[in-house]
Each structure stands twice: as structure tokens, then as C-alpha cells.
Amino acid sequence: MWYGPQGNNDKDDAFIKLWNYTIDKIKAEGLKNIIWVYAPRAGRASERITATWGYPGINSVDVVAPIAFSDEVNINNFDDYKKLDKPLGMTRLSPISGTGEFDNTIYAAEWEDQYGYLAYWIADHDDANKKHSLYGNKKYSELFKNSKIATTETIKNKEWLKQ
């Protein structure tokens, strides 16, 4: 079920059944405080029929947080995600070029300008051949100094309370 539908329909019933089966099994174990994140991959139309092809429904999802590999904050189908009426984030966001030349401050500028609804994003990691992480690209320290960007450090230090 990784990143895409198994059939040729808008709603992949097999994915939705798997999603709900997983929820039921975890609930049966007595686990609580789990946040269910629906994370469709944005920008790969060949891997999905529609932007929300496997959305299991409002009662089975807590957060909608697509994945995008892009050298800008380019979230395909953003309006479709907003219509799902859930908090929005980005499960994974990283430059696609992987050269290490990406300017990380672009994320903050475009984020504020275009995607004010988004609550968070998770940056990607480097691999053996590509630099996708914030640290692997340019101006990461400037990004972290932006007062509108929360990092694990600023959250741990409760810096939002100091303003």
C-alpha cells in the first residue's frame, strides 16, 4: 500500500480496510493517545488516482499531512486537503535536487506566504547519494533563527512563552 492505490478507483477499498483494521487492532490492545496521520504523497499523479484516493474518513484521521519532494514548498492539491477539515501539516518535505545547494530559507518564506494553514513539517534526511536534510543544504542556521519556525530546541525551551 506504500504511497499509492492498488486499483483503478478513486477510493482504494483495500487501503481503507487496512487502515481501519490497524486502528481496531491497536485499540483492542488498549493503546491510547495515538494520532492518526493521513500522509498522501503529493505531486506523483502516477501513484494515485486523486489527491485523497485512500482517505479513510473524518472519524479515522486526526491530521492530514502530505509528503512533498520539491525545491519549493509546492503542495499539490492543497485545497483538496483543506476541505478534509483536519489540522494540516507536512509529513515529509525536502528538496528534490539533493545537491546541497538548496536555500532552506525559501521554505519559511513560502510557508508563510502560501500555506498559513499548515501547523508543522518534518524535514527529510540525507542518504548516501543525496542531500535532502536541512543541515545538508544552505542557510539552515538562518532558518532555525526565524522566530516563526519552531524547532525541537525552541519547543523544549518553551520560547513561544517568552515573546
Image (spheres, grey):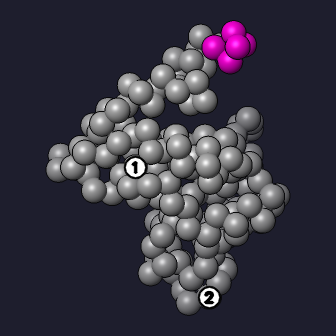
Question: Is any atom of residue 142 visible in this view?
Answer: yes
x, y percent for residue 49: 56, 82
Structural crowding at the residue carrying mark 2, measured as other residues with C-alpha within 10 Å and reported as few (<14), some (14–19) or many (≥20): few
Residue beneath the point at 52% across and 27% down: 146
Residue beneath the point at 70% across and 69% down: 80
* Image position of 33 with respect to 43: above or below: above
Which element is circle 2 on? Answer: loop
**For the view shown, which residue lies furthest in the left direction?**
129
**Most frequent secondary structure within the magenta stretch:** helix
Q: Amino acid at mark 1?
A: Ser
On-image quarter of the C terminus: top right
Q: Which span of residues is magenta-colored?
A: 159-163
Structural crowding at the residue carrying mark 1, measured as other residues with C-alpha within 10 Å and reported as few (<14), some (14–19) or many (≥20): many
Residue beneath the point at 39% across and 44% down: 124
x, y percent for residue 162: 69, 9
Residue 162, magenta (yes or no)? yes
Question: Is any atom of residue 25 visible in this view?
Answer: no
**For the view shown, which residue lies furthest in the bottom direction?**
8
Q: Using the image, tell me which numbered label, if any, was put on residue 94.
A: 1
Q: Using the image, tell me which numbered label, if any, was put on residue 9.
A: 2
x, y percent for residue 4: 50, 73
**Left or right of 64: which side holds 128?**
left
Indicate which label's residue lies in the foreground, 1 or 2.
Answer: 1
Q: Nearer the viewer, residue 86 or 151?
A: 151
Q: Amino acid at mark 2?
A: Asn
Which element is circle 1 on? Answer: strand
Residue 68, magenta (yes or no)? no
Q: Earlier in the sequence, mark 1 or mark 2?
A: 2
Residue beneath the point at 43% across and 38% down: 105
